[in-house]
Image (tube, rainbow, N blue to C red):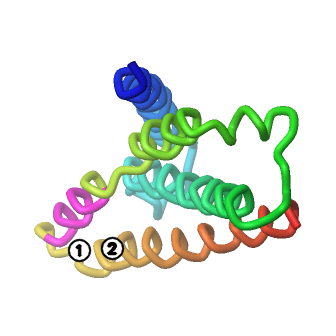
Amino acid sequence: MTFVSDLFAIALGGSIGAVLRYLITLTVVSAPLSGWLTLHGSVGTTLANLLGCCALGGLFQFSQALVASDWVATGWAASLAHPRTLLAVRIGVLGSLTTFSTLIGETAVFASQGRILASSMLLGINVIAGWCLFWAAAAVVRNWTS
């Protein structure tokens, strides 16, 4: 029963993350952006990836605080601390919100069009900014839980 419940939690989280990703992309595509920015779908992917990295960094540190210290989660944090909830958020929501395969596909399209700079910038922004946001969020949560 536990395994099946975990799968359902991940599936529920995945559906939430997929809808969030779609809404982010729709919002970016429909936003009036400046004329030089023609990569609307890529901006949506980047925004989803960066938000996901930030959330994952915070969740990572939250999990670390639960395991490695005397800090005790209360209220909503206690609900988030449940292993099944962590699975639903980490693998389900954030797994479907962030999309490495979409990122690689978009960079490949730009590269195949000869837009090497756009391809490289898109990949670099996602990887470097994502890494920075992950650790920045972890630091914020570390301060919150200590």
Q: Are marks 2 and 1 in contact (CB under 8 Å)?
A: yes
Pick the residue in front: 52 or 123. Answer: 52
Say which residue label 1 marks. 115
Pick the residue in front: 8 or 42. Answer: 8
Label 2 secondary element? helix
Q: CA distance from mark 2 to mark 1?
A: 5 Å
**Of the residues shown, which amino acid type is indicated by label 1?**
Arg
Can you say which quadrant of the picture contains the N terminus?
A: top left
**Of the residues shown, which amino acid type is indicated by label 2?**
Ala
Label 1 secondary element? loop
Can you say which quadrant of the picture contains the C terminus?
A: bottom right
Question: In the rendered view, does 32 fall on the left or right side of 70?
Answer: left
Q: Position of residue 28 (x, y in %)?
A: 52, 43
Pick the residue in front: 28 or 102. Answer: 102
Q: Residue 63 appears in which quarter of the rendering?
A: bottom right
Q: Residue 111 appears in which quarter of the rendering?
A: bottom left
14 versus 102 height, above or below = above
Q: Is residue 121 magenta?
A: no
101 versus 121 height, above or below = above
Q: Residues within 10 Å of mark 2 (few under 14, many from 20)?
A: some
Give the residue displayed 64% in from the left and 36% down from the top. 82
Q: Residues within 10 Å of mark 1 (few under 14, many from 20)?
A: few
Give the residue displayed 43% in from the left and 21% down from the top. 5
Assign the magenta stretch its main secondary structure.
helix
Part of the protein shown in magenta: 103-111
45 versus 88 height, above or below = below
Say which residue label 2 marks. 118
Give the residue displayed 56% in from the left and 41% down from the top. 86
Tell how many labels.
2
Pick the residue in front: 87 or 16. Answer: 87
Q: Is residue 104 magenta?
A: yes
